[in-house]
Every structure is written in C-alpha cells, then in structure tokens.
Amino acid sequence: MTVGGCGSSSDPSLDQTGANPDLPGQNDALLPAMEIPTPVGWNGELPTVPDGFTITPIAENLKIPRQLLILPNGDILVAEGSGGKAPKVRPKDVIAGWIKGQGKSPVEGGDRLTLLRDTDGDGQTDLQTTFAEGLDAPYGLEFVDGSIFVANQGNLVRFEYTDGMIQASGPPIEVTKLPAVINHHWTKAMTASSNGSKLYVGIGSNSNVGERGMDVEEDRAVIWEIDPETGASRIFASGLRNPTALAINPWTDALWTVVNERDELGPQLVPDYMTSVKEGAFYGWPYSYYGQHVDPRIQPQRPDLVQKAIRPDYALGSHVAALGLSFATSGGLGGRFTEGAFVGQHGSWNRKDPSGYRVVFVPFKNGRPSGKPIDVATGFLKDGYARGRPVGVAYDRERRALFIADDVSNTVWRIDPTVTTEPQATEPIRRSNSD
C-alpha cells in the first residue's frame, strides 16, 4: 500500500549506519511518502540466515508477540499484545494510521504472557502454555530475584516466580503506574541494572515532534529509573523520542537503548539509533536530532536544550524501526557473532523503498560499537510483501542461540549454529555499579 509524496526517493550513496551517519537536508513534505508491505505469511519458507546457521520456528499462531525473556531454567516468556489509543490530530495522522494498519497482523493482541519450554534440549518447544493473561498490552519483561516484572502500557507489575513454574500463582502485583495518557507511543521497554537494584523503563513521546503540544509530553520521551521494591521513580534521561528496547552493556554495565527517531523530514531523516544512556542526559527530542541539528517544526524553539543535546553513539539507518536489543556474550552465536549487539528492525512505513525488516548484529570492541551492521536474519520481505516483521530479540548465553519475535507471522524463531564451537575469551569484565 502506497501514498506518494514529493522528495520521497532515497539516495543509496548515503551511509546512514555507524558513528557518523550522512544526514541530508530536511524535506518537510505536506504529505510524505508512505508505503508498507502488506503481510502474506511464510507459506512454508524460512527467513534467510548466514551460512553455518539454521533458523527454526519454535512457536506459531501467537497473538502479536513483542518481547522475549529467557528465564533462569531456559524457559522463554513471550509478551503478546498491542496498545495505544492516541486520537488523530491531523489529516496525515489518519492516513498514516491507515497505512500502518495495512502492515499489521489481523490477529488481535493476546494481552498475555506465553511460556515456551524445550524439555529435551533438542531446540524445539515441547510445552507451550499461557503463563498469565488479562494484561494490558504487555511489552517490557525482566526477571529479578524471584520476580518476573512486566511493563504494561499503563503500569509496571510483577509476578512471584519459582524455577519451573508454568503458570502464575496469582494475579499481578502493581509496582507503579506508568504514563499512559494518550499513549501515542505505547510500548514500555524494560531492563534491570546488573545488580537488580533498579529497573529502567522506556516511555515514548506522545507525538511525532510535539504537534499535540508540549503539555502532553510530561514524563514522555524519557527513561525512568524505578526502585522495584517501592515503585519510586525518577527520570534517568530525556529527549529520547521512543526508546523501544533497553539492555545493560555487559562489558561496561552501562544502560543502552535503541530509539525510533522522528518522521516527516524525508526518507533519510532521521536515522534511528543505538546509544549508551547517560544519567541526567538530554538527547534532543523534539528540538534537535543527532546532537545540535535543529528541527524547525517545534515552536517555541529551545536553543538552551539544543546546546545540551548529546549525539547518539551509533546510527542504525533511517526509519528501520528498531524494536529489539540483546547483547551477545559467552562466545556469541556459533563463535562468530561473539561481541556485540543483536538488533531487531521492525521496518519502515514512511518511505517508498522499505528499510529495516531484518535482524542485524552490531560488532563491539572494548564495550563500544566497532563496525558496520551484519545481517543475521533477512528475507522478511519478498516481492514487495511482508512475510514477517522482527520485534524483540533475545540471546541465550547458556544455549548460545538467538530468539526472535515476529509480530506479523506471529512466530518465535530460533537461530542456531550448525557447528558448535568453544566459547572465545569475550566474557565481559564486570565493573563496579554506581547504583
């Protein structure tokens, strides 16, 4: 499905990944190009993985799988759901909403957690059961000290957990409310500090670039730090338009995130990115992007904040819609993807030539990105149609496998090496935690 706009062609000569992406001039079209591949399913085929690897569906017929959590015993929890109830404020919002709807699964979100278990270690799911239901668009998942934490679109809850449980023993216990008015960006990503003393929750903006007014952006476009015991919260960092996945860098203990940047400045503005998150830092939204590149659409301007804006660490490409982040350790995937981050890219809806629709690996060295993205899973697009769209990714360090949630074919995929190699010396060196 396509809606055309002027100036909508991409320039393939631009390099928009890495530490210093090419940033073209702005093009705020009245009606920007919007195109999304419509779903067709896999029809028995599989995503493409590099030589030396296999990919297998381990769960199918799910209800909008979003994020994944690997439990201590190897079971996998899948958060299933779809949220957001933001009213449309401009004609182009109506068009964009309709376009984006064409690229989604027709299945209604499950508002539940599904548990997957491989009882005999053959890589296949032997038990698939509902762990908890009746949730409200669950997204972020984390396990800390005998509790499973779930970030719904409107609150953070926890379930008591003992090893081997296949069903929650009771209803969820609310830890704290999360900002939920309007919920233009409804997903609430989550991770825990390495010592488990703090939870971090990503809260996306209530608009593309402040068109609803800045009064509705209070506690939006931020990452909260939350005490899991008391529910007390504070803003850890701000100016992050939509932080859709969070993870702790295992080599530095720093918080990292992937962020979906703003639309309607052209097919190659603004690159989505992956970055470390500094306490108290401001990352630009809505007043600037990639440091001090001013966005003129937001009024009044805030040059004081622009001056403070931090440039992200690593560009992933414009409109790739990164929704998954997981670091590789313990020899990585097959001894090949050993030190770095897997990133799930859900894919664009707002440019003529689709971007994203893949899972990539960003290599790291000494705790920092050190090279260009490498394709890990592709083939989600075929002949202009979407067979799937990757969301959450989860690297299992014990089994040295990668799991991918696909919310169009409603599948969880598993990638394994065909030859097992011994772990290389890439185990992270833990540093002191400032918490």
Image (cartoon, grey):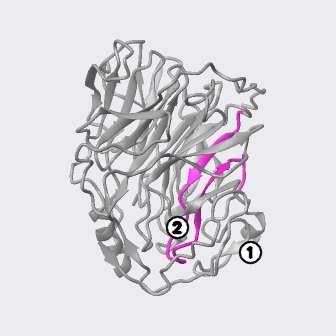
Place of residue 428 in the rendered image (x, y in percent of width and height, measured from the top left) = 71, 27
Residue 48, percent across and down? 41, 45
Who is closer to the viewer here, 340 or 149? 340
Q: Nearest to the eye among marks 2 and 1: give it.
A: 1
Quarter of the image holding residue 269?
Answer: bottom right
The answer to if 75 sits in the magenta stretch is no
Residue position marked by numbered label 1 in the rendering: 303
Find numbered disc 2 in the image and state the secondary structure of the residue it sits on.
helix
Amino acid residing under circle 2: Asp
Query: Residue 141 occupies which quadrant of the picture?
Result: top left
Q: Who is closer to the viewer here, 86 or 333?
A: 333
Few, some or many residues within 10 Å of mark 1 (<14, 14–19, 20+): few
Q: Residue 169 has which mark? A: none
Disc with the residue nearer the chain's start (2 vs 1): 2
Residue at left offset 46%, top offset 51%: 358
- Relative side of 223 to 81, left or right: right
SS category of the residue bearing label 1: helix
Q: Return the x and y of residue 366 as percentages of the image width and height.
A: 78, 37
- Image: 152 above or below 429: below
Q: Which residues are magenta?
A: 253-281
Under mark 1, the amino acid is Pro
